[in-house]
Image (cartoon, rainbow, N blue to C red):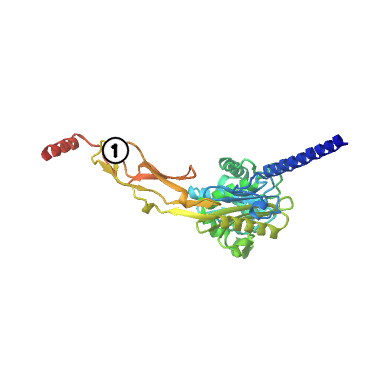
Amino acid sequence: MESGKKTVIFIKTILSLVISLSLVLCDISLASATGSTPGDTGGTATQTGVSILARAAVLIENNSGRILFEKEKDTELVPASITKIMTLLLIFEALHDKKITLEDNVSTSEYAASMGGSQVFLEPGETQTVDTMIKCISIASANDAAVAMAEYISGSETEFVQKMNAKAKELGMVHTSFKNCNGLDDSIKSGHYSSAYDVALMSRELVTKYPEISNYSTVWMDEITHSTRKGTTQFGLTNTNKLIRTYTGITGLKTGSTSKAKYCFSATAERGGVSLTAVVMAAPDPKERFAEAAALLDYGFSNCTNYSEEASKIHIKPQKVINGIKDSINAEVTGDFSYTLCGNESSDKIEKKIMVKPQIKAPVKKGDIIGNVVYILNGQEIDKIPIKASEDIKEAGYITYFQRLLKRLLMC
């Protein structure tokens, strides 16, 4: 009997240990599945307090590109009209490269005019300026205007889409493939898809490189003038992004919805030097996508602050020059330092190192880089700002060396 009791106790002990071990392994598995562990800056709903019903979502800090929140960020989904973020990016790139201007007149082809879905009802042969076309794409998510601009920039939508995919590759958008420039009638099977993180990457590129997009993406209502053979008519534009009326600091950016994609949204906002992008994909209804994007932005702004230092406040002492007509050269820092601190990061822990070339040989031209101001946080370099020469220093010749020798002799 005594032996039997000991056996039962032993079996119960073993079972208890197995159950405990199973629970631990379950917790580890769950943490692995969410892509986060306690203490990460990115995270899950339980870590951040943000509840996301959408299929996929991501929040990034635009200064560094760090991920602050993620949920199935790399899942390939139908993007619908947030496809047009890439279209707008290439339009602004063409403007920056002076390949087109805002005043250029863009003619609408029959193909562009045939687009369904959200549109501004451009007619074949109708012309609008690039500026107006951007309004139509940004405010009204016009499919016809997007195709008209694609054709104007590249000659055909097909050629333009090739540029879209090339740009996606350049930005590291590894879960994206475009088949058209507007997201109309797209499907994963056809090869038109993207992910929440990839959408965030192209959104970040657009708002940081071309902040003037907000001049269009934050307009609530506007109108355009149709001038065709039928006469002149006014057409009203209403922004599909409802947050521009309610969210402080909103800068854009783009909504999208189809029966396949459900409700998608890329929201960008800036407060106090902190710039964020929140992407929600496949939300169950339009209100939910706006609520969840706002919640993600709120989370980001509550956990991030901006730290900056003006270049004019950084003094660089004159640097020694070898073989120059002068023995030293004046230098200056070429840009301000700005960094977004998130989570437990503190500005007190940011180190600044002024690192100048060990040897600066003449000739030196004004604007030549002679060093860097390096900023370090927790042992990692977070930024590097060039130090440039603020004057010209010519190489010394025989006359200069003779004058220096004579000066030394006279001083003896």
Q: Nearer the viewer, residue 147 or 381?
A: 381
Q: Which residue is mark 1?
A: 363
Q: Nearer the viewer, residue 85 or 149?
A: 85
x, y percent for residue 179: 66, 44
Residue drawn where x is 21% and y is 35% of the image: 397
The N terminus, quarter of image: top right
The C terminus, quarter of image: top left
Number of dots carrying numbers = 1
In the image, residue 154 sits, relative to residue 225, either above or below, namely above
In the image, residue 91 sits, relative to residue 234, either above or below, namely above
Residue drawn where x is 49% and y is 49% of the image: 96
Residue sticking out furthest to the right = 1
Badge 1 density bin: few <14, some 14–19, many ≥20, Cα 10 Å? some
x, y percent for residue 325: 23, 40
Is residue 271 visible in this depiction of the protein?
A: yes
In the image, residue 12 sits, relative to residue 125, either above or below, namely above
x, y percent for residue 323: 25, 36
Q: Amino acid at mark 1?
A: Pro
When asked about the image quadrant of residue 328, the answer is top left
Q: Nearer the viewer, residue 260 or 125?
A: 260
